[in-house]
Amino acid sequence: MNVDVVIIGAGAAGMMCAVEAGKRGRSVVLVDHAPRLAEKIRISGGGRCNFTNQYASPEHYLSGNPYFCRSALARFAPQDFIALLRKHGIRFHEKKLGQLFCDDSSQQIIDLLKTECDDAGVKWQMPSKVLNVDYAEGSHQQAAQSRFTIKTDRNTLTARALVIATGGLSIPQIGASDFGYRIAKQFGISVTSLHPGLVGLTFSQDDFSGFTNMAGIAMEAEVGCDGVVFRENILLTHRGLSGPAILQISSYWKPGTAIHINLLPQQNLLDIFQQHRKSNQMLQNLLAHYLPRRFVKIWCDTVLPRLAQTVKPVKQYQDGELRQIADALHDWQLVPSGRAGYKKAEVTVGGVDTHALSSKTMEARQVPGLYFIGEVVDVTGQLGGFNFQWAWASGYAAGQAV
């Protein structure tokens, strides 16, 4: 079968690209190895799909080339995807911080994209496994000729443009693979270092043993590392820490470094201590007014001995000791042993090196006709709909060029 465009990967970015290419009169085939369409969209946002963030802008993305995402994000904004939802009568709401969710089900987003693809004349080939990709050298002047031969378990496809939209390594249980990175390397395109992102952090037993029986306790905190700070909830788990603030910082954390947790970002603990300076109240009872009691007990048992201190009535502490305790609560430093892994990660940090791609079209600079979009590229959004917005924007950009 000879077509204009073959897109490998029928997820968010792949379908968006197919829609735009089809609208421009291109013959398009979408190939995907999964038996079920867009599983990652289906399970996202607790089944309601956090499909974008109305405040999406370049500073919400992590990349070795931080300016790369600007062009695509400017050309397809959150309002553009919202217009699609309104066209299809899909109701949505803002949960918090600009995060937009479907009122009903994430299946509505999948159905929207499927309908748009069908209306644009896109052909589907799934489940279908790609066995091999070959390339015939050619210039942009030879763009009308087929450059790529894609051998699958069903047939052989030839196309003048090939788009890789196969995602990253996160959530392998629904089919994630390293296919996109292997294709990049086949064509001499570098791939940056990869690690799980938007994922919980784990700790060694020595550092965290007292807290492991407190799974489910959540509290608002400010978490920072490497000059980046997020203020949202943290959640204790059997293996370490999770919750939105931890998921956010996990994308930036580097092994061997500490994370800094302000357990009372909304309070000045030193002021509180001064207000209770003459109190007979035990320290942990006072702290339990501001933090979960069970957590306070373990924190005091674990951290105070390191400060050469014990639990006693507030009035028995010296001013310097109270300052030391306040500093420790406002800057609880922990060194994670690792991340919870790709099975739990929402995204893959890193990917196809953006220095090798055009920021306007997503085309590989040295391989005419080859495009990379979505999560497979070294552009990773923060938590809250930013990764879907990158999928829509990069898919749109490539769809306008293929």
Image (spheres, rainbow, N blue to C red):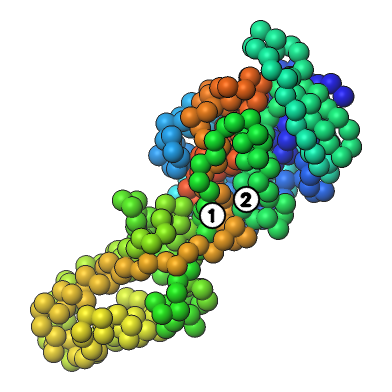
| Closer-to-camera residue (333/81) | 333
Q: Residue at x 31, y 51 (%)?
A: 227
The tag on residue 169 is 2
Asked which quadrant contains residue 111, the reply is top right
Closer to the camera in the image, 178 or 51: 178
The reply to whether callout 1 and callout 2 are in contact (CB within 8 Å) is: yes
Q: Which residue does the image show at 83% across and 36% down from the upper left? A: 152
Q: Position of residue 15 (x, y in %)?
A: 71, 35
Give the residue drawn at x 53%, y 48%: 194
Specify the amino acid type for callout 2: Leu
Q: Hey, which residue is sitting farthest right in the picture?
A: 154
Q: Which mark is residue 196?
A: 1
Mark 1: amino acid: Pro
In the image: residue 182, left or right of residue 68: right
Q: Quadrant of the N terminus?
A: top right
Q: Is residue 230 above or below residue 373?
A: below
- Is residue 346 depicted above or below 290 in this figure? above
Rendered position, 208 above or below 160: below
* Camera sees residue 126: no
- Which one is in front, 221 or 151? 151
SS at mark 2 in the image: loop
Q: Position of residue 364 (x, y in %)?
A: 58, 25
Give the answer, above or below, for where 136 lies relative to 347.
above
User: Would you say residue 206 is visible in this rendering?
Assistant: yes
Q: Position of residue 189 (x, y in %)?
A: 57, 32
Q: Residues within 10 Å of mark 1 (few under 14, many from 20)?
A: many
Disc 1 and disc 2: Cα gap in Å?
Answer: 8 Å
Residue shown at 30% from the left, 69% from the top: 332
User: Which quadrant: the C terminus?
Assistant: top right
